[in-house]
């Protein structure tokens, strides 16, 4: 008789713990932060840049996944999207749709596993106020989209948090 022992995958255990913590943090942030906020996401190993999601009170919780808008990176006209790991500019459409299985041309929500939501882009100031760690870039925005990126004073902190969680929970960088 051969006994095959099941070995735990340490990253899988860490992802489960992160997912449970992230769900609680999302619920807490939705309950205490007014309006909307953004999160950083791990899409897959091939996507090296930071990916962002848009969260509002209309976002829905599921057992293993969270329904939100996954946002596209900002791309200068005539160029390709950057996959550089420090790239963190993204487009927020001015009009989006929250209706599932809708055929309209607007951007729709997607299901994302809690374990793939790496950080919440909100910080607490020294005065105790909660603020966005991303801000608008007005000169790149237009009527259809608003361009956002990490605010200068939060950029290093947010990129470091994102990168360390990406490597710890999912995949190393290949660049």
Image (cartoon, rainbow, N blue to C red):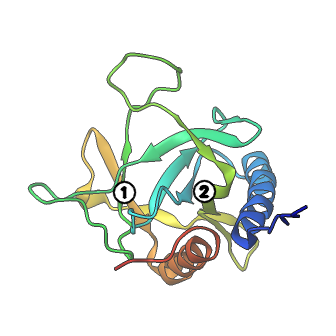
The answer to which image quadrant residue 88 occupies is bottom left
Estimate the spatial distance between the alpha carbons at disc 2 and disc 1, rounded to whole Å.
18 Å
Residue pointed to by mark 1: 90
- Could you tell me residue 144's position as x and y percent? 28, 38
Answer left or right for 10 relative to 66. right
Residue pointed to by mark 2: 116
Crowding near the residue tagged with mark 2, few <14, some 14–19, many ≥20 C-alpha atoms within 10 Å? many
- Could you tell me residue 6's position as x and y percent? 82, 64
Crowding near the residue tagged with mark 1, few <14, some 14–19, many ≥20 C-alpha atoms within 10 Å? many
Residue for point 78% across, 46% down: 31
Residue 23, numbered label: none
- Could you tell me residue 40's position as x and y percent? 54, 60
- Could you tell me residue 122's position as x and y percent? 63, 64
The answer to which image quadrant residue 49 occupies is bottom left
Considering only vertical position in the picture, is 152 above or below 89? below
Residue for point 13% across, 60% down: 79
Disc 2 element: helix
Considering only vertical position in the picture, is 39 above or below 93? below
Q: Nearer the viewer, residue 53 or 9?
A: 9
Q: How many marks?
A: 2
Answer left or right for 163 relative to 87. right
Residue for point 85% across, 66% down: 5
Q: Earlier in the sequence, mark 2 or mark 1?
A: 1
Q: Nearer the viewer, residue 115 or 8?
A: 8
The answer to which image quadrant residue 157 occupies is bottom right
Residue for point 33% across, 56% down: 73
* Image quadrant where one finds the C terminus: bottom left
Considering only vertical position in the picture, is 50 above or below 31? below
Nearest to viewer (mark 2 / mark 1)? 2
Which residue ends up furthest to the front in the rendered image?
1
């Amino acid at each position: 008789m051969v006994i095959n022992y099941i070995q735990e995958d340490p990253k899988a255990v860490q992802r489960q713990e992160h997912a449970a913590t992230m769900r609680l943090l999302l619920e807490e942030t939705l309950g205490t932060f007014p309006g909307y906020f953004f999160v950083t996401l791990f899409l897959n190993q091939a996507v090296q840049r930071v990916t962002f999601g848009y969260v509002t009170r209309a976002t829905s919780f599921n057992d293993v996944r969270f329904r939100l808008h996954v946002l596209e990176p900002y791309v200068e006209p005539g160029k390709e999207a950057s996959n550089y790991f420090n790239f963190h500019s993204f487009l927020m459409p001015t009009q989006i749709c929250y209706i599932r299985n809708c055929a309209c041309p607007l951007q729709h929500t997607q299901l994302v596993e809690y374990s793939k939501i790496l950080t919440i882009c909100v910080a607490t100031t020294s005065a105790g106020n909660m603020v966005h760690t991303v801000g608008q870039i007005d000169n790149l925005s237009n009527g259809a989209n608003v361009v956002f990126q990490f605010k200068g004073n939060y950029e290093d902190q947010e990129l470091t948090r994102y990168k360390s969680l990406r490597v710890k929970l999912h995949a190393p960088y290949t660049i």
